[in-house]
Image (tube, helix red, strand yellow):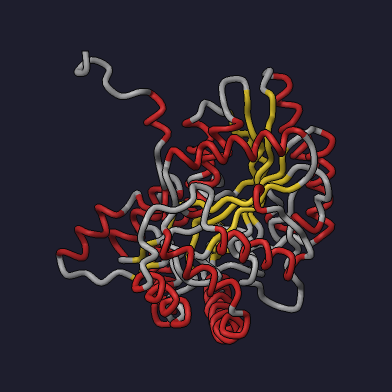
């Protein structure tokens, strides 16, 4: 009967820490309260989508690009993705190994449909992006979390990686992939070539697919350059996730892509499976893909946008980092990319039991909306988005300072 045990147990895994406090925030705003929002990493409200991309979207609409399209993506856009990867990182990907997705989130779902199941698992670096563990568990996969080294700028801990592999083996779980985010959401870390080479070596030793979320690849601070996993992995099977959301400030377009790299039968089988999965959702947004061609190919307009966008994001990140480290009970590593900070907080100092209780107190009492670190796989922390203007960042830091004074 439908009324008995209606929901499958997998629905219990569908949780997303970043949006958990929406009802509380709505109640505050309905009562006339003003919230300092540092919770959602959406650059569009602060910087807008570049006009040249919006114009291309408009041309696509007026030009009739509104029908169904190819399931793996429109050919011009796939070709533009391939050109960009070759241009920036010297890596060649054939068209049959490039798939357009509805954001990077759909790409990771495709991968879990292909690879996850009972008795299978994956290694994820913690802190991680909150949807990645639920998407693994929904398909009966088991996550193994390797904690990054906070004191070393959130670098990977290879010894801990080996412990996770040993734990999976002891539990009879077959690891299928390892997932990293570089630059990182939520820490702002940027991994150098040496760190990536160590991860590649671990993946090779354990016969794992490497999945690299590189959606912030051009939002990098300082002189150190971003290194793509495609520059390090060679013929080892690997997947790169990217999209228009962050670097091109087009979150609402919901256009991402995945590139399958490396050699071997497994890569061919994965390509075929993702192709078939793509047919089930018909196709991604057609006009958004044609706007994406302009976004990726118009290098001049893109460089001009980044020339103002990235320095401003860096300024706000640096300001927030300095303010946080001035607060008793807070310590924070400097961000080297993306637009997040992940400070450690002295929860006991606030009179709260854990970071989840703390961020709720922060919102309800101080009207500052951040996200608990436990939602990213590491308690005793919280994530702040550094996109808002300096006055909002200051209001958030002032509220954190007040909340850390136990009442």
Residue toward you, 314 or 235: 235
Q: Which one is in front, 220 or 20?
A: 220
Question: Is residue 156 at least partly visible in the picture?
Answer: yes
Would residue 315 be found to the left or right of residue 148 on screen? left
The vertical placement of 58 against 266, above or below, is below
- The residue located at (47%, 31%) in the rendering is 138
Front-most of residues 353 and 155 = 155
Residue that extends furthest to the front in the rendered view of this protein = 64
Name the image quarter holding residue 368.
bottom left
Horizontal and vertical percent position of residue 74: 52, 57
Q: Quadrant of residue 363?
A: bottom left
Q: Given the current orientation, which residue lies at the most extreme left position? A: 31
Q: Residue at x 39, y 52 (%)?
A: 68
Across the whole image, how many numbered discs are drawn on residues? 0
Q: Is residue 116 above or below residue 197?
A: above
Picture layout, residue 293 above or below residue 256:
below
**Left or right: 122 with respect to 36?**
right
Which residue occupies 49% across, 50% down?
70
């Amino acid at each position: 009967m439908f009324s008995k045990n209606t929901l499958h147990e997998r629905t219990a895994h569908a949780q997303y820490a970043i949006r958990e406090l929406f009802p509380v925030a709505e109640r505050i705003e309905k009562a006339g309260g003003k919230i300092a929002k540092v919770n959602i990493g959406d650059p569009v409200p602060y910087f807008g989508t570049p006009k040249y991309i919006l114009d291309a979207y408009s041309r696509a609409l007026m030009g009739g690009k509104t029908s169904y399209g190819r399931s793996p993506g429109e050919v011009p856009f796939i070709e533009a993705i391939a050109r960009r990867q070759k241009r920036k990182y010297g890596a060649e990907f054939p068209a049959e190994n490039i798939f357009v997705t509805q954001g990077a989130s759909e790409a990771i779902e495709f991968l879990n449909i292909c690879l996850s199941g009972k008795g299978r698992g994956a290694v994820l670096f913690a802190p991680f992006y909150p949807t990645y563990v639920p998407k693994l568990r929904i398909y009966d996969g088991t996550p193994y979390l390797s904690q990054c080294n906070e004191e070393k700028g959130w670098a990977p801990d290879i010894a801990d990686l080996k412990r996770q592999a040993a734990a999976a083996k002891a539990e009879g779980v077959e690891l299928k992939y390892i997932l990293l985010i570089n630059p990182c959401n939520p820490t702002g870390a940027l991994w150098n070539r040496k760190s990536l080479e160590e991860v590649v070596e671990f993946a090779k030793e354990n016969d794992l697919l490497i999945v690299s979320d590189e959606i912030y690849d051009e939002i990098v601070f300082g002189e150190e350059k971003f290194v793509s996993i495609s520059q390090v992995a060679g013929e080892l099977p690997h997947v790169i996730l990217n999209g228009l959301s962050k670097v091109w400030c087009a979150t609402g377009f919901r256009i991402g892509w995945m590139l399958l790299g490396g050699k071997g039968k497994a890569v061919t089988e994965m390509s075929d499976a993702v192709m078939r999965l793509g047919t089930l959702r018909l196709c991604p947004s057609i006009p958004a893909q044609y706007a994406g061609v302009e976004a990726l190919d118009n290098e001049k307009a893109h460089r001009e946008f980044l020339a103002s966008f990235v320095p401003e994001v860096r300024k706000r990140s640096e300001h927030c980092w300095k303010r946080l480290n001035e607060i008793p009970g807070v310590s924070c590593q400097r961000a080297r990319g993306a637009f997040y900070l992940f400070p450690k907080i002295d929860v006991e100092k606030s009179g709260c039991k854990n970071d989840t209780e703390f961020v709720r107190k922060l919102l309800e009492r101080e009207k500052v909306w951040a996200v608990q670190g436990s939602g990213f796989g590491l308690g005793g922390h919280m994530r702040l988005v550094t996109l808002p203007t300096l006055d909002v960042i200051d209001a958030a830091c002032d509220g954190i300072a007040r909340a850390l004074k136990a009442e």
